Image: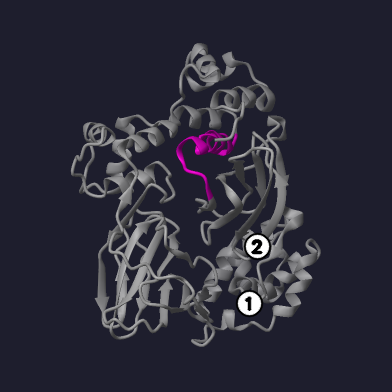
Amino acid sequence: MPTSTLSVGWLLRAWRTEVSRRSATSVAAQVGVGRSAVANWEAGTRRPSKADVAVLDNAYEAGGTLVGLCEALQTPAVFDADKVWWHHFARSSGPCWAWIRAVEPGRRMRFDARWGPLHVELTRRVGPDGLIIALPVSTPEPPVRFTLDRPGWVAFGVGRVPPTLHIPSLNVVGYIRPVWPAEPLVALFAGPLRPVLRPHLTWVDDLKTILGFTVAASGSPDGATREDLTPHAPHMTADFESQWSGERYRALREVRGLSRVEAASSVTSLSSKHPVTAGALETFEASGNPRVASLAPRLDVVYQGQGRTVVSEVSVTRDGTRWLPGFPDWWRGPVWMQATRRSSDSKPATIEITWGHWRKRMFLRPHAVIGTRKASSGPSQPTLKLPDGWSLRAGIGEHPKALAIDFGWWPATAGDARQILLRYSPVYVDLVGGNIDDLPVDHADLRRSVR
């Protein structure tokens, strides 16, 4: 774990004194607590609850940034170091950030960041307090992916981190490049947004070379390139179930600032048919088995575990050659799927998956595990088209053998391409501080749709 002098108490005091420049007395009066409560939170003698931090965030008009930083500070204490970190932001557009911490502070670390058609690859020193990467825009989907050259931690949040906190930071706007020319999102946005982006970012001129990839917006059945995933080693074992111990879930709950009563209420709200009591949660945290359906996965959602705390299997239904995984409506995070051949034949085949506005075709070996992400809670299920003689298993959580397929998706139809354009164009216009009215006249329908 990185050695740092930063703590939640330090952060609360620094925000009050260096950012908001307010007295503890005035803050206590505004949030409805005694001055001693504010002093204890800042001294670290009493842990503020999630609700306490949210109230302070509102009082300081921090826009969620203070809440995010408080949660991010605890990431190395509860999660194992890793090289790959993903995040779905809850809303589109607006500034956001990623906080990188290193296992061995002081060394240079290379990171590769990708969100949608945008990409940054840099090497920087990451000290004991980490390095905050300021990102220009946030999107619920596709997710942000950070890949590190050595294990570390990356936590995410929204807003702008004030420079007066003196946490090392880097704005990466000047380093942004397109991902790669054939990426569907790049091709989809290249034509409509080029007049807006061209005066601001030099790399937009490179998009001239990909304007021929109009298939991204055409909806042609032949447009979705069949990605060859056959080099991915198959996962043959039948064991798909894993989860953290109750003790680790307790530690994560405390870091998130939730009491057992608050946590039980939030877990119950995800699936009221399977209520959870504070007593059941206490039993679970003591390594007992309270026999509550989907308890660990729901805890992962409530505690913002990003699917790292549990891997479990879900039911799958079949309709002819189409297979539908039963991902829970309340789940938000990574999902995995494994297409298997019922015979011993190991010959690969083309698999097609459609999810919402998106479609992806893959050349896949039997038993290979693929993974993507369910961006938001609510009804949302993919449909997989498999060859005869194949079947499907699926589940939720960060499967350790899954090959990520979050990128390289194509609009399913021409109508879907238009909907994607309508939804995300404002996000990428925000990237350069532009205005949606700057778009060409022949995209008037786009301007009307986002007003």
Q: Which residue is mark 1?
A: 182
Q: Amino acid at mark 2?
A: Leu
Residue 63 in magenta stretch: yes
203 or 56, nearer to the observer:
203
Vertical position of residue 230 compared to residue 313: above or below: below
Q: Quadrant of the N terminus?
A: top right
Q: Earlier in the sequence, mark 2 or mark 1?
A: 2
353 or 154, nearer to the observer:
154
Q: Residues within 10 Å of mark 1 (few under 14, many from 20)?
A: some
Vertical position of residue 449 compared to residue 226: above or below: above
Residue placed at 25% from the left, 76% from the top? 318
Residue 70 % position (x, y)? 53, 33
Q: Secondary structure at mark 2?
A: strand
Residue placed at 38% from the left, 43% from the top? 302
Horizontal relation, residue 237 to residue 365: left or right: left
Q: Amino acid at mark 1?
A: Ala
Q: How many marks?
A: 2
Horizontal relation, residue 271 to residue 202: left or right: left
Residue 94 % position (x, y)? 62, 50
Vertical position of residue 447 compared to residue 87: above or below: below
Residue 12 % position (x, y)? 58, 25
Residue 370 % position (x, y)? 42, 67
Horizontal relation, residue 298 to residue 419: left or right: left
Q: Which residue is mark 2?
A: 118
425 or 175, nearer to the observer:
175
Q: What is the magenta range?
A: 62-82
Question: What's the image's color scheme?
Answer: one colour
Residue placed at 52% from the left, 86% from the top? 220
Quarter of image, res 422:
bottom right
Q: Secondary structure at mark 1?
A: loop
Quarter of image, res 399:
bottom left
